Amino acid sequence: MDAAEFRRRGKEMVDYIADYLEQIEKRQVYPDVEPGYLRPLIPDSAPEEPERFEDILQDVERVIMPGVTHWHSPYFFAYFPTASSFPALLADMLSGGIGCIGFSWASSPACTELETVMLDWLGKMINLPPQFLAGKDGEGGGVIQESFSQATLVALLAARTKAIHRVQREKRELTQGEIIGRLVAYTSDQAHFSVEKAGLIAGVKIKEVPTDDKFAVRGSALRKILDQDKAAGLIPFFFCATLGTTTCCSFDKLPELGPMCNAENIWMHIDAAYAGSSFICPEFRHLLNGVEFADSFNFNPHKWLLVNFDCSTMWVKKRTDLTCAFKIDPVYLKHDHQESGLITDYRHWQIPLGRRFRSLKMWFVFRMYGVKGLQEYIRKHVKLAHEFKDLVLQDDRFEICADVVLGLVCFRLKGTNELNEALLKSINNARKIHLVPCRLKGKFVLRFSICARTAESAHVQFAWKHIVMLASELLKAQKQQQ
Amino acid sequence: MDAAEFRRRGKEMVDYIADYLEQIEKRQVYPDVEPGYLRPLIPDSAPEEPERFEDILQDVERVIMPGVTHWHSPYFFAYFPTASSFPALLADMLSGGIGCIGFSWASSPACTELETVMLDWLGKMINLPPQFLAGKDGEGGGVIQESFSQATLVALLAARTKAIHRVQREKRELTQGEIIGRLVAYTSDQAHFSVEKAGLIAGVKIKEVPTDDKFAVRGSALRKILDQDKAAGLIPFFFCATLGTTTCCSFDKLPELGPMCNAENIWMHIDAAYAGSSFICPEFRHLLNGVEFADSFNFNPHKWLLVNFDCSTMWVKKRTDLTCAFKIDPVYLKHDHQESGLITDYRHWQIPLGRRFRSLKMWFVFRMYGVKGLQEYIRKHVKLAHEFKDLVLQDDRFEICADVVLGLVCFRLKGTNELNEALLKSINNARKIHLVPCRLKGKFVLRFSICARTAESAHVQFAWKHIVMLASELLKAQKQQQ
């Protein structure tokens, strides 16, 4: 395929994608396929000779689409949103076309520099304290990670290195292994499992801090566990706070937790993967109060800020905390400006070496929507979630299980877990909408998450009517059995 | 921007990318910008109101392009190649359009299943032993990692878990921390720095095994260090072999190392990041002999197999080795088929949770090139490297510093390191071609790596003439100073 054919096929692909997204409502949101469906549909080895593009595009409909969960269908209310916008798609095409690998400043200066400035733009949009910004000569700054799980891991590893150095200065008799054995990190009992996974990887203990009746970690709860652990000879070194938990979008109390972490030499990392995008709206910014106590902060514009996956933005107050944990410089990556102090080699900020030109997506999206356009988008989703909550509240067979703050509604039928599991099964089996559950203090709960960019009131109303119908059927069947 | 505007702008973008790639030779391969060049060129915060696409596209030329290192210029001979092909660009557009997140089978079955089958296709293309393939019910299988550094880390962590479990069974008196403190991993003194970084992350010792005069790890060298370490009470558990080192494309002796690793319960991981793609050609497949002893194997189709970044393919003989190291299952990710044994939830195979639909790129590239087309492409690059090597050998002021096996030529002026550093500086300052150096047994060496898909004999000939001219100037100036 040469450039001329790419021009033709690329334009066909643009139309295919536009058609797909324009007509996505007509596709069944969750597929019917069974495990192993795909293998028999295609040959069992690669062809020796080239095939025609037409045949491949036909196979997309025959082989791929029947097995796709359509995350951008307005009937998709599962997990959390994943971003999709046209400006981001355009920028990603450009990023692919340029195809540079930005592991060092020299490997493509624009790739590094646009990222640093875009992280400053976004930091200002959410009113981050200036220590988190790179500016011209700041000590902090931002980086795009592939995912918030990587951001959590990077923060944990940086904190581990810092803690080891500190303890080594204070207690010279301890070996590094002994120190690691005593280190202990904390997170909410509602935190995402990736925090536990980061602990597994780093080889340090992670303890869950119990949450209050709003599913939030309070200062008192952390205080209690800290005191116990210190008395037992452990060394607390890391706390991962969550703003907008995956289960129910609850918020840990940063203003209580932050000063305690600072006083105890505990690195406070904030995971606001989903909720972070909302902080661009002044009315939601208060949810971030206390960030000034944090060492690192992360959220995913690829969730709710219209910047397609992958774009997980992370800021630190001291960039040397990251680079100290990871910096290894072989000759083949050295370059003239390296020791100038002027540049950023992002490979020292992350787990992998290579990286794509991801900041183009942020640049395109921020400019084509404008901050106002992005705020409107967030507000629309929050409004739809409240619309759904109000519908639930009007039916006294149902209950709301957690405060509705942003775009997630946790609800259930008043009744047993089995009943609610049956309801979810019946909803997902009907294939009209797609939801996933969570468990809140032992209760099986349904999560209704506003996800698609194109979700409107009509979709929410449809979803609720559909849920009510299935619930009524279920309750009726249950009554008949009794 | 709605779908209608996306149709128009998307097509403009396709043309922009086609123009860029068709005319890339006219652009200066390495940019002139100084650190900090970009910040003053754009506003210091995001716009409130939406901007026009035309203005953004103009800014790509004004702001971005002057700071891009053009990896796909045929005058780019630095690092190793990074893939760029039109079929991969098309597939990546589609992947962005679908925009699903494939962390579990249920989150988009097609995303998981195509990946499993594509890894089988590619495994067959390089004639991997069948234990590495998933097939319908195999114990092994493949996964796409973001980068080979992640693959190395994942293998190291899986090996660590396995070793801890084994030692705990044998020596019940040791705590997990004590075991980790005794674990020791090995790799070549020529290995990529990411192996050392993986050790830092996992908190285990990594030792370098000295290489022979061909820059290869031999069985005898590993034997010696193993015996020493075991005598000292350490527990060897992991060896990362390299096929095609970053410095000079040397190959560790798998047939000597593999049986030793197997006998000693040492996980053998193979990093063939660059060289792996060549194994699709029967004449290079012998370089992979000994893979049958490995536990995991990895290479980067995004380097040399025309599948754009990111696509780092990794295979394991026992998939449970990976899942045991990482598996944590929260309620919100559970799905009906999870415990059926029929499906793959790739989040247990990797560090991050989220993942894009990357296997589409493999499918498009393999089908549109065919195996024959891909083989031709590899052979062309190897031929060009040999052409360059022959040119070097004809000028007795120069020497070849390592065997030329694939597309990399390591060469230098006979003389001091300072002289060669000056030559490299002069080459890169002239901005006609771009190279990076390496260090081989204390010698400063220039690496000439065939990178661009469009590199031809004419570019190699031009590069050599240019190098000779600069070298002659340098030698003349040096003589005059004496």
Image: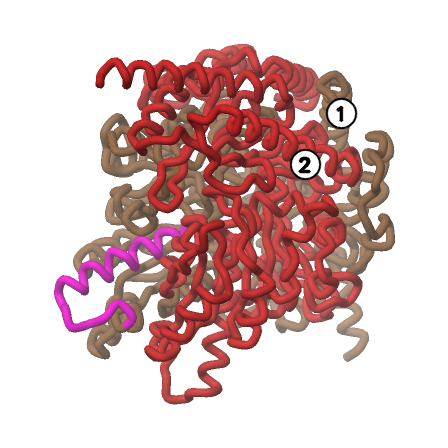
Chain colours: A red, B brown
Task: Name the amino acid type tagged 2.
Answer: Ile
Q: Is residue A480 above or below residue A173?
A: above
Residue shown at the point (36%, 35%) measured from the top left: B126
Q: Is residue B382 magenta?
A: no
Q: Chain of mark 1?
A: B
Q: Is residue B379 visible?
A: no
Q: Looking at the picture, tell me which residue is in the foreground, A393 or B249.
A: A393
Q: Looking at the picture, tell me which residue is in the foreground, A303 or B295.
A: A303
Q: Which disc, if any, is residue B1?
A: 1
Q: How many marks?
A: 2
SS type, badge 2 = helix
Task: Name the amino acid type tagged 1.
Answer: Met
Q: Looking at the picture, tell me which residue is in the foreground, A218 or B327.
A: A218
Other-residue count near label 1 (Cα within 10 Å), few / some / many at <14 / 14–19 / ≥20: some
Q: Which residues are magenta?
A: B151-177
Image quadrant for the C terminus of chain A?
top left
Q: Is residue A154 above or below residue A21?
A: below
Q: Position of residue A210 (x, y in %)?
A: 40, 58
> Does label 1 lie on the same chain as label 2?
no
Residue shown at the point (49%, 33%) measured from the top left: B101
Q: Is residue B171 magenta?
A: yes
Pointer 2 residue: A378
